[in-house]
Image (tube, grey):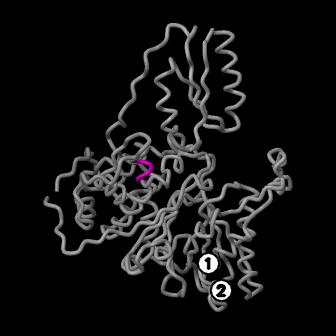
Amino acid sequence: MTFRVLDPTTEKAPPAGKLAPRLDTLEGKTIGFISNGKEGTKGFFRHLDQMLREEYGVAKVVSRTKSNYSAPADKHIVDEIKSWDAMVSGLGD
Amino acid sequence: MQLASKTYDANDISAVQELYHSSGWTDGLPIVPPTAEAVQACLEWAMMSPDQLIGIEPVRGLAITAEKLAINAVMAGCLPMHFPVVVTAWMAMMQDEFLMHGATASTGGCAVLVVLNGPIRLELGANGTFNALGNSDRATAVIGRAVRLCLINLMDVRPGVIDRSTLGHPGKYSYCLAEDEEDSSWLPLHEQRGVERAASAVTVMAAGAPRQLMNEWTTKPEEILETFAAEMRANLRHYSIHPGNYAIVVPKQLREHLQAGGWTKTKIAEFIHERARIHRREWAEVGKGAVVRDRGDSVYPAMESPDQLLVIAAGGPAGGFGAVIPPWLGNKSHAVTLPLGVCIDCEPPKS
């Protein structure tokens, strides 16, 4: 007996985001961090902040932490992203 | 009724199984072949068109349609009469306060507990007595499994993909129970949560594994409930201090002592709310001294308020057992109760 069966998946890829233009240099740029707020993020972002400023000449680092580490970033943080040249999002488990 | 899903031809039942397993579309157990006829029967029973939108998953913008839920429900073993419960469970899971993405992706590894109330339990033969938290009956087995297969296939909640659970628990195969309303003087869960008693309802909760307890050596309500509270304190000490929706499952033997003493669900919740709390310093006794810091005297209750406790009457008639079902992670996800849709004098969708 043959079966004709149906695909159980959504079949459609979720709406894709678009990558921001790549930067030629980090010098003089503003970099944003979005942390999920877990313990492990603290040392990581502290070190990255120092590295970006001292070794790559980044002008400004803006650190933001989500109010709920299990949920998407808060709207006010997302709204702020467009004022940054690049961003780093980090998990801290 | 025209379905939109891609179709595959398989020569026999074994080929169907291999197609679905090898595509990553199962939970590892055999599935029922989702043929167009079986899927259409589910949709017709629920009077839903295939493209009816159940909701948009908020994090990745995935559209969840009735057709896709029905395909996964058939795979799980659902008959058409089970399908409206699966739809309602998914509608509840898609409420913002359930935080579906976080609850299903988290390393914490919770499952979706589904509790059935109202006349639908009897119509489906859902059994709230013997083995209530296990393989108690067909209806709860397939409804719970359908919820999981939908997560796997509609949201990529596959181990190592979206599902980042460190351990998970067996309830991730199926975690559904019916309340034993007939053998209880308590308000049913759905009525306590704002749904008319005569309606059927589904409650979903992002839940850890059940923690079984036993106290057969007293008939005093306070002592019985102290055992439940102690199990919750153990969870606060060993797992997570965050307050949120806890559920307790109270089988008949212990329930009769509580009911004989005039203890309602509200009174039980108030008592447990007072008793299920710990000091932060207690963490030092269980190897977590490093996070006590200077806040040892802070008190952490299991629930912020008594109404966060879900008291469920279920279980076989004998045995002084009970269970505490802890939340995934405190208040990050809230339990949601929704009534099953009813249709009075309405027409099925045109095919």
* Residue B143 colored in magenta in the image: no
Q: Nearer the viewer, residue A11 or A37?
A: A37
For image coordinates 58% across by 74% down, the residue present is: B311
Q: Report the side of A12 relative to A50 (left or right).
A: left
Residue for badge 1: B250
Establish if B201 lies above or below B72. below
| Quadrant (top left, top right, bottom left, bottom right) of the C terminus of chain B | bottom left
Residue for badge 2: B258
| Quadrant (top left, top right, bottom left, bottom right) of the N terminus of chain B | bottom left
Q: Report the side of A30 relative to B277 (left or right).
A: left
| Image marks 1 and 2: residues in contact by CB distance under 8 Å | yes
Q: Could you say whether the residue bearing mark 2 is in a helix, strand or loop?
A: helix
Counting from the top left corner in percent of width and height, residue B69 is at 34, 55
Q: Report the side of B7 relative to B190 (left or right).
A: left
Counting from the top left corner in percent of width and height, residue B200 is at 39, 74
Counting from the top left corner in percent of width and height, residue B274 is at 72, 71
Q: Nearer the viewer, residue B235 or B2?
A: B235
Give the quarter of the image for residue B235: bottom right
Main SS of residues in magenta: helix
Residue type (three-letter) at the residue carrying disc 2: Leu
For image coordinates 56% across by 29% down, the residue present is: A89
Q: Which residues are magenta?
A: B149-153
